[in-house]
Image (spheres, rainbow, N blue to C red):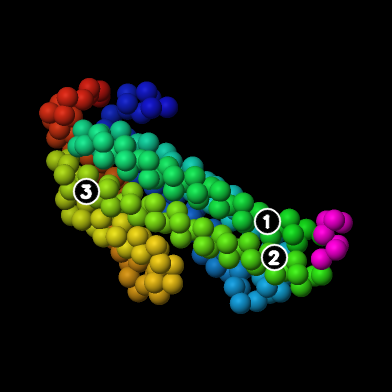
Amino acid sequence: MMERIAETSPRLKARIAGVFYLLNGLTYGFAAGSVRGKLVVFGDAAATAHNILAHEPLYRLGFASDLVAAICYITVTLLLYDLFRPVNRSLSLLAAFFSLVGCTVMALCTLFEVAPLVVLGGAQYLSVFKVEQLQALALMFLKLHAQASSIFMVFFGCYCLLIGYLIFRSTFMPRIVGVFMAIAGLGYLTFLSPPLANYLFHRVLMPAGVLGEGSLVLWLLVFGVNVQRWKEQASAAGGSIRT
């Protein structure tokens, strides 16, 4: 895969990364907002269990969307790593490391989404539990999913911060996009304290994330990169250039 990415033109890499970045945002947003946001009632285990069982196809679609989001972000990570190698190979590799760890945690988090379907599935071996206990277990798994989500957001915060720095140091993308990405990354790092992040989410974090990652996605899709400047920076860094 990395060989094929290396053979792709910088502008095409950037636009492909933009497409997958957009797909990541759409699929993750759908799973978090249109599925879990509507079906999960964190203060009511019975209502949550009823919603999941009554809308099981939608719930399963949300689970699948989270997996697709993780796959899309892995693709973005590989493309941006190759794109920003001429700026600083070591930092680009470090950024990719943080992102891939975050994607791994994100994918593992989906196990907590599957668990409620198992405990609420009515299997014979679960008959030793009362209905209320099974409902409580299902909600517990969803709360664990929310806690684990804070972990991968910290890794993505580190990623956004490093990508922002690489954009700022590059000569082939606007520095302001790098500043916006760094701000988004700093915002995501507040998930080190989930209560603080939850308090700031709608007030600060969501606008900062949309501004940072949204501006990057828009630039990648519309403009890509300045190919000539990318080649010059790659040549100065001693990297091989392919068109």
Give the quarter of the image for residue 184. bottom left
Dot 3 or dot 1, earlier in sequence: 1
Give the quarter of the image for residue 58. bottom right
Q: Nearer the viewer, residue 2 or 193?
A: 193
**Residue 126 lies in magenta, yes or no?**
yes
Answer left or right for 33 relative to 187: right
Q: Which residues are magenta?
A: 123-129
Dot 3 or dot 2, earlier in sequence: 2
The residue tagged 2 is 137
Q: x, y (%) of residue 135? A: 72, 69
Q: Is residue 15 visible?
A: no
The residue tagged 3 is 165
Instruction: Tell me which amino acid carries mark 3.
Output: Tyr
The residue tagged 1 is 115
Q: Are marks 1 and 2 in contact (CB under 8 Å)?
A: yes
Q: Nearer the viewer, residue 177 or 49?
A: 49
Q: x, y (%) of residue 21? A: 39, 47
Look at the numbered disc 1 and give the secondary structure of its residue: helix
Label 2 neighbourhood size at 10 Å, few (<14), some (14-19), many (20+)? some
Q: x, y (%) of residue 139? A: 65, 67
Look at the numbered disc 3 and give the secondary structure of its residue: helix
Q: Is residue 199 visible?
A: yes
**Residue 41 lies in magenta, yes or no?**
no
Instruction: Tell me which amino acid carries mark 2.
Output: Leu
Residue beneath the point at 87% across and 56% down: 124
